[in-house]
């Protein structure tokens, strides 16, 4: 009988280690099972029982895989069908012992990911992960969380083997050797770094992951120094967590580390202390997972949600602001036409109208960010567009800044709005220019690149070919806090008067509305690289030319024309009514789409329908326009709006953007027809 305070034998120490591993295994939120080559259960953890709600009496060493299948089928886990045929089919697949990964949905809605790994000469390890929450999240983090949340698996059967071999030292030694080999085979198969260190922080075991990440030899863990392979700075940051674990506290923490090839990874490490018989800490088990993709995907998701919220707010405000500007601009225009006010036009009225137009342009910029501005997409060669505007770009730069345009020989064909792309490139070059103090260099590159699954997932794009446009400068650069806010409207680091803070916001809106994205890489003092990714086409397509609208002859008897004006804003209706009356129309007003349809159904001889698009009450301007078109006897149908959401769903009628003057309205009415 060994005294409690006596030095434990090697076999007892190993037994305690495996018991501790089992404790750690039960703490993991991932289910684990091991079956042998006879499809008998020989190891599991508590999470496995919880995930499947198995009764304790059904789970024991030697449980038949077939019995578990039958129990699940009887309680409706696999749906309807022939139970014997289903069970035999699953058994045949299991006997093949091939790696597999699949997901299944339990009747209670829980989604489980099942990952099977064959262990030659031993059996089959299966990991069960509850991925319900991940499957409801964005696609970009769906397949990673289960792996990243996994924990080390260990075989409880090893303990049984050791207990059975206690009577013979030779059998014990042989069993320990086999168990160590089996444990190494298992841990080397895990997508994680697994290690064990003693209470003096000396490594006693490391798995193959350390060789793959840092080039360390798993056969000589005693030569491994965490300070050396992590670096002094990184080790200093994580050392307090290591000391907490050595005081008996299980800890989990995240940090950045450089691996082979200077690859920066974001990792999550869990330290689980091992206790000796006297409850002192004998050492620590270490589990480290690469969460780089998860973290970056989460950052992209948060950024996208923030920008979507800002865009929704911007789009909602644009309509109201443009209504306000429409009243201001319309009344100023009408005032300027009064004989008594002609002396005030140049000094007072014209500057006010220019200010109102500037406000309208500002709203259009915000709508571009909010992805509410309709794009006029055409299939173009981006190389050609860059070559065309290169002289313009050069003229915007001082002599001390050199502009390089690097264009590939391969055509970069993309279905985009060329004017919006030109504006975006101008804004990016302006930003690069302002970031350079003195002599410098700006490079604009265009190429066609293919995004693989990993890179596309990081950018939240689909796998495929994209036009890649890069604008790089050697200016002052930006820190992480600035990059996190750089796409927000009105956020700028420039001095007052040198920018509105809308350039990058517009670029962001244009890129995402075009089906692509924009990405910024920058460090203080090292310049900035802005990359636009835009969907490409294999070759240009020839679209049929859109016929220009034919201008209508002015109606000599316009005084007899009846117009239906529809807008929910009384001030806007009053302003536009005055314009229509001045143009010779008799005007009927409606304050909602529902009222407008009622008037159309009851009023003959309506010659013009002029309707706002966005209106409360459930019936918008598009529905009014379709109703008027179906009537078939209204010559002119024109829609107007402070912004045009879902422009591709608008009826084929003329769209007039608020605010507008009487002259602009008159020009639109000459083009508006049914």
Image: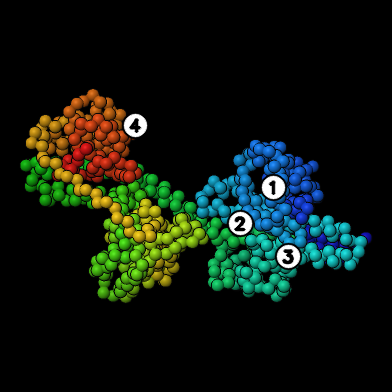
Q: Depth check: 440 or 235 in front?
A: 440
Which residue does the numbered mark 1 point to in the structure image? Answer: 90
Classed neighbour count for the residue bearing mark 2: other residues with Cα under 10 Å, few (<14), some (14–19), many (≥20): some
Number of the label disc, if any, that sits on residue 365 = none
- The first of marks 2 and 3 along the sequence is 2
Which residue does the numbered mark 3 point to in the structure image? Answer: 184
Residue 81 can be seen, yes or no = yes
Q: Quadrant of the C terminus?
A: top left
Q: Quadrant of the N terminus?
A: bottom right
Question: Is 234 on the left-hand or right-hand side of 459?
Answer: right
Measure the alpha-carbon separation of dots 2 and 3: 20 Å
Which residue does the numbered mark 2 point to in the structure image? Answer: 148
Residue 517, image x, y percentages: 41, 57
Residue 326, image x, y percentages: 22, 42
- The first of marks 2 and 4 along the sequence is 2
Q: Is residue 543 above or below residue 183?
A: above
Measure the alpha-carbon separation of dots 2 and 1: 28 Å
Classed neighbour count for the residue bearing mark 3: other residues with Cα under 10 Å, few (<14), some (14–19), many (≥20): some
């Amino acid at each position: 009988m060994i005294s409690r305070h006596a030095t434990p034998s090697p076999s007892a120490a190993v037994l305690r280690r495996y018991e501790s591993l089992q404790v750690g295994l039960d703490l993991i939120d991932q289910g684990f099972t091991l079956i042998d080559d006879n499809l008998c259960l020989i190891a599991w953890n508590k999470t496995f029982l919880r995930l499947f709600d198995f009764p304790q009496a059904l789970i024991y060493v030697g449980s038949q895989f077939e019995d578990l299948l039958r129990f699940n089928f009887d309680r409706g886990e696999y749906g309807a069908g022939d139970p014997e045929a289903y069970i035999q089919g699953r058994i045949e697949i299991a006997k093949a012992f091939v790696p597999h990964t699949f997901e299944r949905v339990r009747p209670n809605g829980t989604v489980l990911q099942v990952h099977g790994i064959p262990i030659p000469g031993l059996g089959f390890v299966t990991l069960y992960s509850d991925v319900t929450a991940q499957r409801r999240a964005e696609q970009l983090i769906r397949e990673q969380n289960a792996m990243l949340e996994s924990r080390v698996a260990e075989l409880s059967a090893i303990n049984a083997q050791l207990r059975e071999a206690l009577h013979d030292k030779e059998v014990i030694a042989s069993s320990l050797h086999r168990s160590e080999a089996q444990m190494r085979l298992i841990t080397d198969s895990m997508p994680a770094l697994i290690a064990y260190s003693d209470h003096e922080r000396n490594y006693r075991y490391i798995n193959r992951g350390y060789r793959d990440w840092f080039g360390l030899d798993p056969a000589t863990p005693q030569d491994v120094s965490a300070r050396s392979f992590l670096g002094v700075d990184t080790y200093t940051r994580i050392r307090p967590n290591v000391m907490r674990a050595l005081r008996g506290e299980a800890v989990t923490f995240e940090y950045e580390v450089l691996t082979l090839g200077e690859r920066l990874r974001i990792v999550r490490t869990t330290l689980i202390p091992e206790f000796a018989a006297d409850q002192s800490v004998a050492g620590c088990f270490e589990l480290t997972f690469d969460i780089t993709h998860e973290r970056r995907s989460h950052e992209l998701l948060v950024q996208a949600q923030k920008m979507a919220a800002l865009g929704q707010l911007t789009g909602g405000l644009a309509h109201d602001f443009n209504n306000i500007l429409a009243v201001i601009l319309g009344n100023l225009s009408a005032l300027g036409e009064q004989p008594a006010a002609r002396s005030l036009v140049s000094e007072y009225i014209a500057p006010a109208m220019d200010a109102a137009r500037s406000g309208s342009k500002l709203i259009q910029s915000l709508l571009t960010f909010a992805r509410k501005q309709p794009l006029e997409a055409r299939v173009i060669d981006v190389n050609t567009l860059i070559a065309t505007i290169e002289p313009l770009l050069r003229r915007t730069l001082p002599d001390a800044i050199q502009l390089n345009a690097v264009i590939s020989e391969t055509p970069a064909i993309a279905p985009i709005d060329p004017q919006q792309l030109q504006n975006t490139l101008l804004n990016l070059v302006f930003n690069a220019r302002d970031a350079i103090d003195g002599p410098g260099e700006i490079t604009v590159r265009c190429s066609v690149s293919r995004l693989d699954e990993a890179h596309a997932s990081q950018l939240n794009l689909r796998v495929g070919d994209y036009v890649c446009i890069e604008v790089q400068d050697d200016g002052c650069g930006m820190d992480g806090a600035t990059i996190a806010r750089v796409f927000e409207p009105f956020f700028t680091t420039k001095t007052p008067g040198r920018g509105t803070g809308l350039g990058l916001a517009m670029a962001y809106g244009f890129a995402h509305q075009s089906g692509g994205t924009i990405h910024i890489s920058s460090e203080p003092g090292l310049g900035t690289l802005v990359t636009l990714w835009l969907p490409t086409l294999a070759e240009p397509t020839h679209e049929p030319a859109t016929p220009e609208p034919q201008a209508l002859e002015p109606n000599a008897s316009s005084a007899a024309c009846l117009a239906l004006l529809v807008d929910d804003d009384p001030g806007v209706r009053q302003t536009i009514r005055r314009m229509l009356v001045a143009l010779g129309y008799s005007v009927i007003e409606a304050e909602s789409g529902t009222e407008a349809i009622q008037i159309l159904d009851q009023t003959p001889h309506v010659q013009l329908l002029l309707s706002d698009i966005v209106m409360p009450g459930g019936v918008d301007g598009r529905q009014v326009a379709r109703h008027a078109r179906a009537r078939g006897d209204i010559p002119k149908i024109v829609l107007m709006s402070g912004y045009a959401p879902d422009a591709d769903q608008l009826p084929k009628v003329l769209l007039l953007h608020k605010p507008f003057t009487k002259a602009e309205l008159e020009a639109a009415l000459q083009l508006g027809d049914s």
